[in-house]
Image: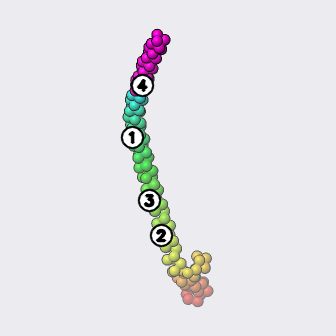
């Protein structure tokens, strides 16, 4: 019976010791969890600021890119419109003179001038 009493006392002490260890472990986990949450909260604040700055920088970069793209597209539009204008001018010129430049008929007045000068030199007119 004495052995059983000692064994029950030992078991009771062991149970109490385990409960204390368990409570200490839970307390340590709670403190660790709280510390982690505090760290995450401060990191979130920092990350939010950083993300906000990054978003602002990205927005600024996007705005700059959009502005550059708009300027480039305007320049391309100007170039394109000038190319179109040149093509239209070329088409109008082809309608007026359907031959390439080398084969265009000579100007009538220059022919008249050449004939007049030729006749004057030969004495046919004066």
Placement of 30 over or under 76, stated as above or below: above
Judged by depth in the image, the label closer to the viewer, 1 or 4, is 4
| Distance from Cα at disc 2 to Cα at disc 4 | 82 Å
Q: Secondary structure at mark 4?
A: helix
- The foreground one among 20 and 116 is 20
| Lower position in the chain sequence, tag 1 or tag 3 | 1
- Residue 39 % position (x, y): 41, 29
Judged by depth in the image, the label closer to the viewer, 1 or 2, is 1
- For mark 2, what is the residue? 85
- For mark 4, what is the residue? 26
Magenta residues (range): 1-30
Q: Which mark is residue 74?
A: 3
- Magenta stretch: helix, strand or loop mostly: helix
- The foreground one among 77 and 103 is 77
| Distance from Cα at disc 3 to Cα at disc 4 | 68 Å
Measuring 46% from the left and 10% from the top, which residue is drawn there? 2
| Lower position in the chain sequence, tag 1 or tag 2 | 1
| Distance from Cα at disc 1 to Cα at disc 3 | 32 Å
| Distance from Cα at disc 3 to Cα at disc 2 | 16 Å
Q: Are marks 3 and 4 in contact (CB under 8 Å)?
A: no
Q: Is residue 11 magenta?
A: yes
- For mark 1, what is the residue? 52
Q: Is residue 24 magenta?
A: yes
Q: Are marks 2 and 4 in contact (CB under 8 Å)?
A: no
Measuring 41% from the left and 46% from the top, which residue is drawn there? 59
- The foreground one among 11 and 106 is 11
């Amino acid at each position: 019976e004495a052995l059983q009493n000692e064994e029950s006392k030992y078991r009771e002490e062991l149970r109490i010791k385990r409960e204390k260890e368990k409570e200490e472990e839970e307390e340590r986990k709670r403190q660790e969890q709280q510390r982690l949450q505090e760290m995450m909260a401060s990191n979130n604040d920092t990350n939010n600021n950083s993300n906000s700055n990054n978003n602002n920088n990205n927005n600024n970069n996007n705005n700059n890119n959009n502005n550059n793209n708009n300027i480039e597209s305007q320049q391309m539009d100007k170039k394109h419109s000038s190319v179109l204008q040149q093509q239209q001018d070329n088409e109008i010129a082809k309608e007026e003179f359907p031959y390439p430049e080398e084969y265009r008929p000579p100007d009538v007045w220059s022919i008249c001038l050449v004939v007049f000068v030729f006749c004057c030199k030969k004495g046919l007119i004066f």
